[in-house]
Amino acid sequence: MELYRCSKCSSEYVFRRAVCPKCGSKGFDSVEVKSAVALDSVHLIATPEPFPDDYRVVMFQSGNGARGFCRTTSDVKRGDRLRIGMDENGPVCEPE
Amino acid sequence: MVSIVAANFARFGKRDEDIFAISSESALPIVDKFRDVIDFVVVSNSYSGEFNDISGLNNLLTTHLAIENVPSMRVDNTSGSGGSAVLVAKSLVASDEAKNVLVIGAEKMTGYPTKKSTRIIASLLPPEERRGGPSLPSLAAFMTRSYIREFSPTRESIAMVAVKNHHNGALNPYAHFQADVPLEKVMASRIIADPLRIFEYCPVSDGAVSLLVTSDENSKSLGNKSVKITGTGASSGTSSITSRESLVSIDSVKNSAKKAFKSARKTPQDMDIAELHDMASILEIVESEDVGFFKKGEGWKALETGETSIDGRLPINTSGGLNSKGHPIGASGVAQTAEIYLQLTGQAGKRQAKNVSTGFSLSMAGFGNNSTSFVYEVA
Ligand SMILES: [Zn+2]
């Protein structure tokens, strides 16, 4: 999936902001992240549209500290290393 | 100083009527009595566009109530709309921009599949976070998991929030749920977001509630019982859940409560009663700590000792809370103020707490994206 890296202080974010909250710079480069670590995961049964009915939401952290959510149908546990990709709805992940 | 002199509910729950009928059911008893003096209307509502295909709800409502010449505005701050609306009303009176402000909190959100309403509520998340599939209830599950890891509460103590609040709701004629739920039933109910179960979440509800906010001087001439708003505090944090330092504490809750207590020159320990934003069971516990009622990591113990029950030292969510009274988004924060008003004026019926003269309410937007706290005292 795509991350946004501050062109001045190199902080990385999952979501795009107009201004880097760490250094105030307005320039961002897009970088690809393919792996991350699971901080925790929640088995979600009542899911929102447009997602399927039953999955785990995983809170992940990339090597450079960017955090976000991805979906998986695998049994991901806290501390697991993840491979991150994309499907039509957004980021998905699998244990490495 | 600013006072509340009237509060009136339309029952929360699955209602057949439209948002106009529900809103006027709550507002009319106040409008009938104070029609000639109401000089501003603040409508708290977040999702009339998404759920009801309505914009400009405030003017449509004043027209419906035949007070269309009274200036009005709609306040939208997601789940925290109600607290923001009360803050706006208080500020209008304090600045002398208006003398008697009618606040109407209303939402009509039933009638859609859960998957659709879950999507609408999740639209307050940053778009890139939202694409990863979280719902608001799933964030409470992340919080619960962190809280259990960090503080080792009994799992039952968290579920006891639902037991306590359903008990209170059963005593409140305006609550969505009207029945007690024993602990065993909560613990055996369907999981929504692991580990939290369906009885630990607020339902999707329709509902409305109205208040009249006025100046202290005015409150005497209006003839009703009154309660003063002696402290207010608004605070904001990030919309991004994954950017937060901690999942077991909410900065906007801590800071808004601190501000409110400071402006009232009171402490959390001075409070006799409180309404907190219990969208999920764990939130009541975390907020009760962040507000300062209990030490961090110890709020769960109050559920075991009964300290926060109606007859306890500090009753929390005597109304049934969002958990049992329901959470018609725009109505919820206004309903918290209304409950404290009813309690402090001795009008809370079967759920009346004894010897209460100070109160606190916390209205929270999103998953703590921002918060508004209030301190109230008997006039
Ligand atoms: Zn930067």
Image (cartoon, coloured by chain):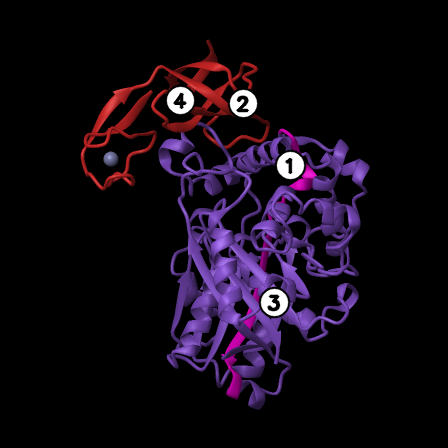
Q: Which chain is red?
A: A
Q: Which residue is mark 4?
A: A91
User: Real-space Cα distance between discs 4 and 2?
Assistant: 12 Å
Residue A61 percent coordinates (x, y): 42, 24
Mark 4: amino acid: Pro
**Contact, CB < 8 Å: mark 3 with mark 1?**
no
**Contact, CB < 8 Å: mark 1 with mark 2?**
no
Image quadrant assignment for residue B71: bottom left
Write down the chain letter for disc 3: B
Label 1 SS: helix
Q: Which residues are magenta?
A: B194-217
Query: Are there few (<14), some (14-19), or many (20+) residues within 10 Å of tag 1?
Result: few
Q: Which residue is mark 3?
A: B338
Ligand 1's quadrant: top left
Q: Which chain is purple?
A: B
Q: Are marks 3 and 1 on the same chain?
A: yes
Q: Are marks 1 and 2 on the same chain?
A: no
Badge 4 or badge 2: first in the primary sequence: 2
Q: What's the mark number on residue B151? A: 1
Magenta segment includes A48 = no
Mark 3: amino acid: Ala
Residue B82 appearing in the image: no
